[in-house]
Image (cartoon, grey):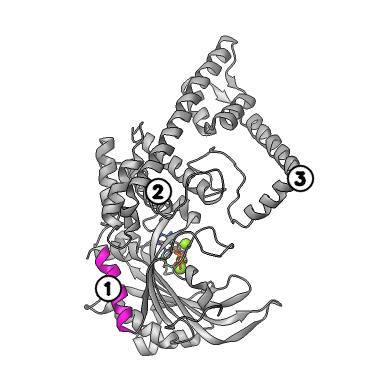
Amino acid sequence: MKASEIRSKWLEFFEEKGHTIEPSASLVPHNDPTLLWINAGMAPLKPYFDGRVKPENPRIANSQKCIRTNDIENVGKTRRHHTFFEMLGNFSIGDYFKEEIITWAWEFLTSPKWIGFDPERLSVTVYPEDEEAYRYWNEKIGLPAERIIKLEDNFWDIGEGPCGPCTEIFYDRGEAYGNDMSDPEMYPGGENERYLEVWNLVFSQFNHNKDGSYTPLPNKNIDTGAGLERFASILQDVNSNFDTDLFQPMIQKTAAMAGVKYNEDLEKDIALKVIADHIRTVTFAVGDGVLPSNEGRGYVIRRLLRRAVRYGKMLGLDRPFMYDLVETVGDVMGGYYPEVVDKRDFIVKVIKTEEERFHETLSDGLAILAEISERAQAAGQTVISGADAFKLYDTYGFPFDLTEDYASEHGLTVDREGFDQAMQEQRDRARAARQDNGSMKIQGGALSELTVKSEFVGYNDLVTESKVL
Ligand code: ATP
Ligand code: MG
Ligand code: MG
Ligand code: MG
């Protein structure tokens, strides 16, 4: 089953159950300073959940574009995580509750009319005190006790406001995905990928009060989210999300450009997956009006793009190539998200310009490094000073780990401590300057609403560091 068909089935199913289908909202949150990106299907619907706005129909379903930068380190390593993904959702604003959604979830997942999973492969987790949910799964659905796992973590609570227990649904991908049941992580809800989490049903039934107490909500809500890419990996019977029709066109195109093959070498596969992931994120973000910059969302986009360029280099792609994948993203996604086709020329231009700039940065940096290392060698030294490495990084935007790579290729080392010290001194200076300056304070206030550090921390450790992404 194609991913586009799964998406349509979801919407059709919930439409049949009386839901209004809402189009995906922009990735850029509207009037919500607590969020940098829309990261769940419920996020753009918050005004309904907290009662600010009353929806015409209390039953809503959608397929929502999401960005989760906290998953960046997982991308390409796990089978199931992306920085950009589509969350299929259905929502009840004070209307139906646990019994209906548990019954419908089961129907959607197991009925051959919908996606027809083998019921024997499904298990769920529940919140230990949520006897109601347990009862519906066990008595109404007939799920045996050993496939209903009680998990303390299954409580959705982000501080003050509506909160409540959740129940998550897992699909057993089989022993080929790991079978050591003595491993504490090897159960639904553990960090393994044999039991693939596909769907989270949240029952928001309490209010988390200012004083820390919990009181029942007069209107109980349902908020669910399921990963389209994960459904697709199961229904297409492939090894990971990256092997589905949502990712393969970008992966195959990148492999062809680089003259490599997918599925032959682990490191190359990771690079291909990261590139396919990041081009989706960047294409959609630019399509929603985010431009590469040194702060906030723009900084995330710049880093993702540069990170992908670095992975491209590992594949031997030494020229701008990401912009060439935008068309492919449009071909795959344009059916439901016309913006990536309508704005294609603009997106291509933004990405190409940014890639060219980064390549210039890299070649300027390499030329300067060559001088520095010649000087060091002529003087009989084997170390590139922290001050030099910092200048490269700070003035020329040249990543620290590339300086290290270059040094080791030339029989040199880099003074990391000196580099860190120079970085710290610069931060202290920047802080002092901010305190002096009234207008910067106001700007600082606006920027502090962003949940990502807006301070420019540079491009060191692009591959491993997760301070910002
Ligand atoms: P996981 O434990 O696998 O990281 P999660 O518990 O963080 O997932 P939820 O916040 O419950 O995920 O989101 C609801 C659903 O959205 C998940 O069940 C999954 O299908 C999907 N999902 C969540 N994060 C990602 C991601 N980074 N990439 C792809 N799909 C995701
Ligand atoms: Mg997660
Ligand atoms: Mg989870
Ligand atoms: Mg979850």
User: Mark 1 = which residue?
Assistant: 9
The answer to whether residue 417 shows anywhere in this view is yes
Please state, as top left, top right, bottom left or bottom right, where the N terminus lies in the image: bottom left
Q: Residue at x 49, y 31 (%)?
A: 402
Question: Would you say 23 lies left or right of 439 here?
Answer: left
Tag 2: Cα neighbours inside 10 Å, few (<14), some, or many (≥20)?
A: many
Inspect the magenta stretch and tell me whether residue 309 lies in it.
no
Question: Would you say 221 lies left or right of 330 here?
Answer: right
Q: Residue at x 44, y 85 (%)?
A: 98
Q: Residue at x 54, y 58 (%)?
A: 36
Q: Main secondary structure of the magenta part?
A: helix
| Mark positioned earlier in the residue sequence (1 or 2) | 1
Task: State the separation of the CA atoms marked 3 and 1.
Answer: 55 Å
Secondary structure of the residue carrying tag 2 is helix
Tag 3: Cα neighbours inside 10 Å, few (<14), some, or many (≥20)?
A: few
Q: Give, as a three-letter code, the residue at label 1.
A: Lys
Q: Position of residue 54 (x, y in %)?
A: 50, 81
The correct choice, above or below, for 294 with respect to 319 in the image is: below
Q: Residue at x 53, y 71 (%)?
A: 153
Question: Which range of residues does the magenta coloring cover?
Answer: 4-17
| Mark positioned earlier in the residue sequence (2 or 3) | 2
Q: Position of residue 107 (x, y in %)?
A: 30, 81
User: Mark 2 = which residue?
Assistant: 278
Which of the 4 image quadrants contains residue 187?
Answer: bottom left
User: Mark 3 = which residue?
Assistant: 435
Secondary structure of the residue carrying tag 1 is helix
